[in-house]
Image: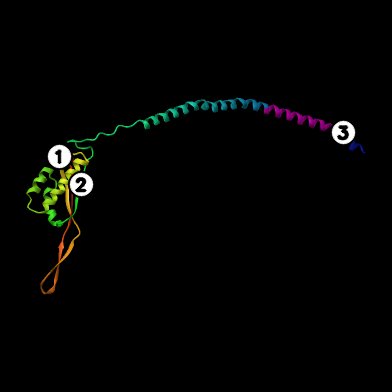
Amino acid sequence: MTDEAKDTQAQDAEEKPKRRRRSRAKSEGAAAEAKAESASKRPRRTRAKAKAEEPKAEEPKEQDATAEEAKAEKVEAETPKAAPRRRGGSEAPATAALVRAQARYVRTSARKARLVCDHIRGKSVEEARAILDFAPREAARDWSKLLESAVANAEHNHELVGDELRIKDAHADEGPTLKRYRPRAMGRATRIRKRTAHLSITLTPKETA
């Protein structure tokens, strides 16, 4: 070996321990920094844990409150409610009671029935009875029967007084027509139309007029 090669080997041997010392110093410095960082982070973690544990301590109170509310709701559901009082006699109910009655297939024409119901529409029950008693038309008998039926419905089903009611609406609709025939001169036949009508009447208390 030449002298130059020997010199290079000697220099390399001297530089290797220096490099090892430097790497050890670096590792020791990194470890110290890591310890310092961990020490600085520890109190933050404990604070976060304390914050996380605070709502857990309050959860039983919230559960107790919800349980008490559920018990109160059960008690309210089990307690029977007082039934609303029914207003009878001369007192009118809170909502306007409408009492209806209907007569179908009455053997009269709708036109003749309308001539009578126009006189009693809007009148009280007492006035309507008087009008129908003295009306000359035969349809007045059918209307009188229907009026008495409506008054009976009001007294029996709605607990109202018949004399304190008025006729809110009364109308007659056309029903089916019966076809009949009669003989005429020269062997012919003509049709006879027997009309029917559907009568309806609505009563309501006077106070709601």
Which SS type dominates the magenta stretch?
helix
Q: Residues within 10 Å of mark 3 (few under 14, many from 20)?
A: few
Which amino acid type is marked by label 1?
A: Glu
Name the residue located 19 percent from the left edge and 48 percent from the top edge. Answer: 101
- For disc 1, the marked residue is 164
Name the residue located 17 percent from the left edge and 46 percent from the top edge. Answer: 149
Please state which of the two labelled residues, at mark 2 or mark 3, is closer to the viewer: 2
Mark closest to the chain's N terminus, 1 or 2: 2
Q: Secondary structure at mark 1?
A: helix
- For disc 3, the marked residue is 10
Q: Nearer the viewer, residue 105 or 58?
A: 105
Highlighted range, magenta: 11-34
Whole-percent x, y for residue 40 in the image: 62, 26
Name the residue located 43 percent from the left edge and 27 percent from the top edge. Answer: 68
Q: Disc 2 and disc 3: Cα gap in Å?
A: 128 Å
Q: Disc 1 and disc 2: Cα gap in Å?
A: 15 Å
